[in-house]
Image (cartoon, rainbow, N blue to C red):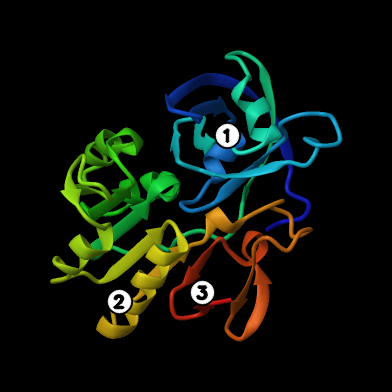
Amino acid sequence: MEATKQAYLCEIVSMDEIAEKTFDLRFRCTQMAAEAKVGQFVHIKCGNDINTLLRRPISICDVEGDVMRVIFEVRGEGTALLAQKKVGEQLDVMGPLGRGFNPIEGKCAVIGGGIGTFPLLMLAKSLNAPDVYLGFRNKDRVLLEEDFTSAGGNVTVTTDDGSYGYHGFAIDKLKENLDGVEKIYACGPTPMLKAVQTLSAETGIPAELSMEQRMGCGIGACLTCACKVNGHYAHVCKAGPVFKASEVNLDE
């Protein structure tokens, strides 16, 4: 992450609650939109008091022209304040930040779980008709299916309880369709990332993992996102959030 990255005042274009405590936020910033790469994140100032002054790191979901799109869950005081912002208000945003994905030309598979699906939409749009696997707890949590389909992907949705799509885990559907896959991209809960890491090691198919869910402050000031990479500890927000599956230790 670039410590001196510029912050911008951005106009909020839309703010929609698309599921319980989950908000789809769009804001306009020509400079960031032009620079943004798949898998990066932005740093949003949510409030001005002692509890919310620290910016919140939120992954970039998509870029449309000069409009940036992020999707976030309300998980604390900061994101609760962010969810109350209105269309037309100014938002203090720093970015784009972090090391993102490296798209390739060949056949790819994209797998996401829960809120880990959000950073994968822009990636899917940059690939050539990827196979997309989206896993959720239940039907009420299924999000962005139409967006991924519109992006040209071959989309498979799974739910843990079988209330929508395939009953089971997204990784199991991915394992059934590995023929010709040249690279796997993943973002989601740690068990999913571990499964993708194991699959990559067993099949020899390279994989990239976004560990965006582990970020805390987003500037390397806390230990929330510390992980071992190539035998040394690193901060996800600074060295990532995207890593090669072969270089990160998910057991620590």
Q: Quadrant of the N terminus?
A: bottom right
The earlier-in-sequence mark between 1 and 2 is: 1
Q: Mark 2: give few (<14), some (14-19) or many (20+) Cα within 10 Å.
A: some
Amino acid under label 2? Leu
Left or right, 235 with respect to 60, comes to right
Quarter location, residue 58? top right
| Residue for badge 3 | 250
Q: Is residue 26 left or right of residue 149?
A: right
Residue at 42% from the left image edge and 44% from the top image edge: 118
How far is the residue under mark 3 from the one under mark 1?
26 Å
Q: Which residue is mark 2?
A: 199
44 or 140, which lies in front? 140
| x 56%, y 60%: residue | 241
Q: Residue furthest front?
A: 161
Mark 3–mark 1 CB contact (< 8 Å): no
What kind of element bears circle 2? Answer: helix
Residue indicated by mark 1: 74
Above or below residue 242? Residue 234 is below
Q: Earlier in the sequence, mark 3 or mark 1?
A: 1
Q: Position of residue 252 (x, y in %)?
A: 58, 76
* Vertical side of 47 occupied by 187: above or below: below
Q: Amino acid at mark 1?
A: Val
Numbered disc 3: secondary structure:
loop
Residue 213 picture location, percent across and down: 54, 54
Look at 23% across and 55% down and name the residue there.
130
Q: CA distance from mark 2 to mark 3?
A: 14 Å
